[in-house]
Image: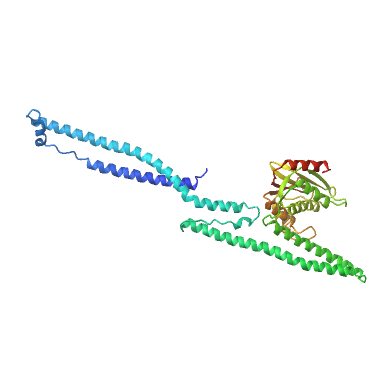
Amino acid sequence: MKRLTLRARLTLIYGGLFLVAGLVLLAVTYVLVDQRTAQPFGVALHDVKPIVQGVDGKLTGDQAEQLRLIVRKVQGDARNQTLDSLLTQGGIALGLVSVVAIAFGWLVAGRALQPLHQITGTARRIAGADVAGRGLHERISLSGPADEVRKLADTFDEMLERLDRSFDGQRRFVANASHELRTPLALNRSLIELAVTRPDASEDVRRLGESLLAVNERHERLIDGLLTLADSEKELTARSRMDLADVADHVLDQTIGADGGPTVTRELSPALVVGDPVLVERLTTNLVENALRHNVRTGGWVHVRTGVWDGRATLTVSNTGPTVPSYDVEAIFEPFRRLSGERLGGGRGFGLGLSIVRAVTRAHGGTVIAHPREGGGLVVTVRLPEAPTTPVDHEVIAATRRAGHR
């Protein structure tokens, strides 16, 4: 059963209270009028004699008594008519005024709840921000008297202020720490390369140097991933029109090697978006590399598809691989998380790839979903707002397709 809104409940309360008060007032008025007219006026013989004598000059006792009964009957009829009119007309008036009071109560309730609507609207905008923490710069800034609603709004603003500082501090820390770590890693790489390339370096030194260079490269990739994750959670500063098909085609050409790995197929249809080209390319690269990395069996394949479906530019990457439990899909989008709660370690990445994909997608106002593929593997679909096409866009897309876009 659907519950009434707060405004409707307040209106019913206002209208109910008014109706009860009106009924009480009508009842009290009825009792007072009834008591005031309960006793008929006494009519004595000497009171009616002058009236009748003015007609014929004679009045007997029986005639006076009959006259007195007639007067009392007229008084009783008048009293009953008065009480009936009071109930009938008073009830009608009370009903009409109650309708007006309910309508007025609806307006008053809406006016009283307007600050709460403002608070709710701000909370919804923050909750619907593209990236966690992005909308925390908004404030309610409710004006008006310092009542309970104003105190609630001020408390909400204080909470947003603290959360905003917390998220900004976290992003700055990740970015600054990553930048600071780049320098010693670059220095380590230079020193190791220098030691390995020396003419008098022994074979053991060369093997050790190659191992250290591999570890150093792994750390550099981790730092680059952290920087990309921090950058993707900021407001977009670079925006340009691009075709997801072109981005995916370029990424596939750069990523796919001739080492006999999984079979890669592409089905690239135009899908124009507006956003940061660097971040969109990194998103596509992460999806393709993730699909290639988890193809551990012989005869595996990766399929990349772009196009526009339901008014959204869509990029879908499907791949074969190990079976993915449906309850574990959401975990792979968390930083440093992999399947079955596996933490950082091993040689199969840091668990930042899909985290960056989700952050970049949200930064562009899109959504990303993943679901296990029947028979093993994963299907990841990124949906971004489609950019409005122009005649120039259609000509460029057509020329690109004719030039051999696969």
Q: In this view, does 2 lie to the left or right of 218?
A: left
Say if 273 sits above or below 61 in the image.
below
* Coloring basis for residues: rainbow
Tell me if I can see residue 319 in this picture: no
Residue 91, x across and y down, in percent: 34, 38
Q: Residue at the location (39% across, 42% down)?
A: 98
Number of on-image labels: 0
100 displayed left or right of 355: left
Q: Quadrant of the C terminus?
A: top right
Residue furthest to the bottom:
200
Report if residue 223 is visible in the image. yes
- Residue closest to the eye, 337 or 142: 142
Q: In terms of image quadrants, where is residue 165?
A: bottom right
Extreme residue toward the right, this view = 199
Residue furthest front as drawn: 392
Q: Which residue is drawn at 48% across and 50% down?
A: 113
Determine the image quadrant of residue 266. Answer: top right
Where in the figure is residue 384, as x and y percent of width and height? 70, 47
Where residue 231 appears, as percent x and y from the top left, is 70, 58
The quarter of the displayed image where residue 67 is located: top left
Residue 208 image point, x, y percent: 86, 68
- In the depicted structure, whether residue 224 falls above or below residue 100: below
Residue at image location 78% in from the left, 58% down from the top: 349
Relative to the observer, which residue lies in front, 195 or 380?
A: 195
Q: Which residue lies furthest to the left in this view?
A: 57
Q: In the shown orientation, is residue 155 left or right of residue 222?
A: left
